[in-house]
Image (spheres, rainbow, N blue to C red):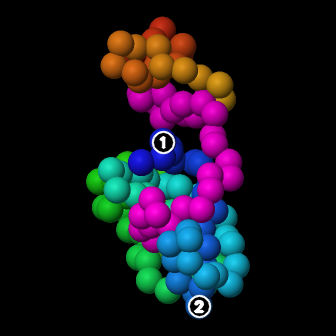
Amino acid sequence: MIRLKPGDRVDCRVKSNNIIVSYGEYDVTRTFEVVHVDDEGCYVFIPCFIYINGGITLDAAKARRMGVDPRFVGEKISYIAESSICKVSYVLDGMKCIKCQDFFIMAEPNTPEGEFWCRSCRANPYR
């Protein structure tokens, strides 16, 4: 699997309003933001101005279970397999703090488990 993170953007080929495998015939290439990644593929955010067949409307309970940013609640997301990604167009460089969930540009893991704790959370664990 391509090493993707939430916030990265991927290009997928679309034919007849369906996201297809990257090596088939296609009508247009669209860019989507990744909201959740698993072993076989990822969930991508489908903006309201792009019509794609399938997908689900994300509710609050599913967003909490998947660890998706709350700003995507009520929006349409779709699951795509790795074979549907024709290229990674933008890689978000940085990490989220595991305590406060704030994103820090250019952050790197600072724990033995490969996680990132921001300076504020390390100084004040009750923050």
In the figure, is residue 125 to the left or right of 89? Answer: left
Instruction: Give the residue type at disc 2.
Output: Ser
Q: Is residue 91 magenta?
A: yes
Q: Are marks 2 and 1 in contact (CB under 8 Å)?
A: no
Residue carrying label 1: 3
Q: Is residue 49 above or below residue 84?
A: below
Q: Which quadrant would the C terminus be assigned to in this image?
A: top left
Q: Which mark is residue 16?
A: 2
Chain part drawn in magenta: 78-104
Q: Residue at x 53, y 83 (%)?
A: 18
- Which residue is at a point 44% across and 77% down the rendered structure image? 55
Residue occupying the point 54% across, 20% down: 108
Q: Which is nearer the N-term, disc 2 or disc 1?
A: 1
Kindly identify the residue that appears in the image at 54 percent across and 62 percent down.
85
Nearer to us in this view, 74 or 7: 7
Helix, strand, or loop for circle 2?
loop
Q: Position of residue 99 (x, y in %)?
A: 41, 27
Residue 8: image location, x then y, percent: 59, 48
**C-alpha distance separating marks 2 and 1:** 28 Å
> What is the secondary structure assignment of the residue under circle 1?
loop
Residue 85 inside the magenta-drawn segment: yes
Front position in the image: 109 or 12: 12
Frontmost residue, 73 versus 114: 114
